[in-house]
């Protein structure tokens, strides 16, 4: 097998593997985003674990999302302007 | 409204905001409504540990002064040493019951001290072998929580005036 065949094989494999990886990243993006969101929400809820009376680590992703959605309000405070935005 | 966010905190990306200059940031304040109806306020702080970023959430009750809960996390602290800020419940639960405002209503940064706590309201014991991470937590809380100071002061004065109004009302009712 000559050098040109090795180069061709390498190029083709690189393109195929890059394509598969790109597809995987795109396909798994929603799962990644949801897991990240749940991880952050678990972190926030851990700060009120005494008030919750439940162990956050044994809760399912859906339970965490539901709990956060029903009992948590988020405000964004503007440090400079001393104003705030609120979202339920 | 400010910084181009229409009127909605859901549009604010706090990870992006964390990279903004300190006095121009939007900071999150989470309000948790417990099953008994009480509200708890969760503040967020981010800082630097020994190896990488550390962050934490501090919960205060309706008095805005006393810590009611806490959670810390890190990106790459050493297991058994700096990582104890997240893993060692006996350590981080020391924060519960500590205060972030003194009796005069001034912001009082929490201290992480070695060799025994002398001011139990404002100090917690350090983790052995994790001095730099401990200092990072102290600095993170000092810098992070002071951004909430103007908002908390406004809430404290609201509480004070509500309390005064209630007292005046009680006095009036008693005199009738």
Image (cartoon, coloured by chain):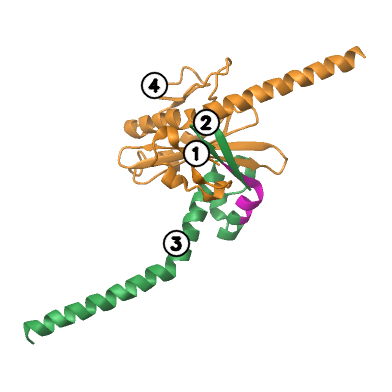
Q: How far apart in space, not on screen, are marks 3 and 4 (Cα)?
A: 44 Å
Determine which residue is flagged by label 1: B27
Left or right: where does residue B128 sit relative to residue A52? left
Give the chain ID for the green colour.
A
Determine which residue is flagged by label 4: B115
Q: Position of residue A10 (x, y in %)?
A: 17, 78
Determine which residue is flagged by label 2: B148
Q: How far apart in space, not on screen, are marks 4 and 1 (Cα)?
A: 34 Å
Would you place residue A17 above or below residue B79 in this image?
Answer: below
Q: Nearer the viewer, mark 3 or mark 4?
A: 3
Mark with earlier residue (4, 2): 4
Left or right: where does residue B93 sit relative to residue B83? right
Mark with earlier residue (4, 1): 1
Chain of the residue where label 2 is placed in the rendered structure:
B
Residues at circles 1 and 2 in contact by the CB criterion of under 8 Å: yes
Q: Where is residue B84 in the image (x, y as percent from the top left)?
A: 40, 40
The colour one sees for chain B in the rendered image is: orange
Q: How far apart in space, not on screen, are marks 1 and 2 (Cα)?
A: 8 Å
Residues at circles 2 and 3 in contact by the CB criterion of under 8 Å: no
Q: What element carries label 1?
A: strand
Q: Residue A84: name its quadrant.
A: top right
């Amino acid at each position: 097998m000559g050098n040109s065949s090795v180069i061709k094989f390498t190029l083709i494999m690189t393109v195929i593997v890059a394509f598969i990886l790109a597809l995987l990243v795109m396909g798994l993006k929603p799962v990644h985003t949801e897991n990240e969101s749940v991880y952050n929400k678990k972190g926030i809820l851990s700060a009120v674990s005494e008030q919750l009376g439940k162990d956050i680590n044994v809760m399912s992703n859906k339970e965490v999302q539901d709990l956060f959605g029903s009992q948590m309000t988020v405000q964004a405070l503007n440090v400079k302007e001393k104003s705030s935005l609120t979202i339920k | 409204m400010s910084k181009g966010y229409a009127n909605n905190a859901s549009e604010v990306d706090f990870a992006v905001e964390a990279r903004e200059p300190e006095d121009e940031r939007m900071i999150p304040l989470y309000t948790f409504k417990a099953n008994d109806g009480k509200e708890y306020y969760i503040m967020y702080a981010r800082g630097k540990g020994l190896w990488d970023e550390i962050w934490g959430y501090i919960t205060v009750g309706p008095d805005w002064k006393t810590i009611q809960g806490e959670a810390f996390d890190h990106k790459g602290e050493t297991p058994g040493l700096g990582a104890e800020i997240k893993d060692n419940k006996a350590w981080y639960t020391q924060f519960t019951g500590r205060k972030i405002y003194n009796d005069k209503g001034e912001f009082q940064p929490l201290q992480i001290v070695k060799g025994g706590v002398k001011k139990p309201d404002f100090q917690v014991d350090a983790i052995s072998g994790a001095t730099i991470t401990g200092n990072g937590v102290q600095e993170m809380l000092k810098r992070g929580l002071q951004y909430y100071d103007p908002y908390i002061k406004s809430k404290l004065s609201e509480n004070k005036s509500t309390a005064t109004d209630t007292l005046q009302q009680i006095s009036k009712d008693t005199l009738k």
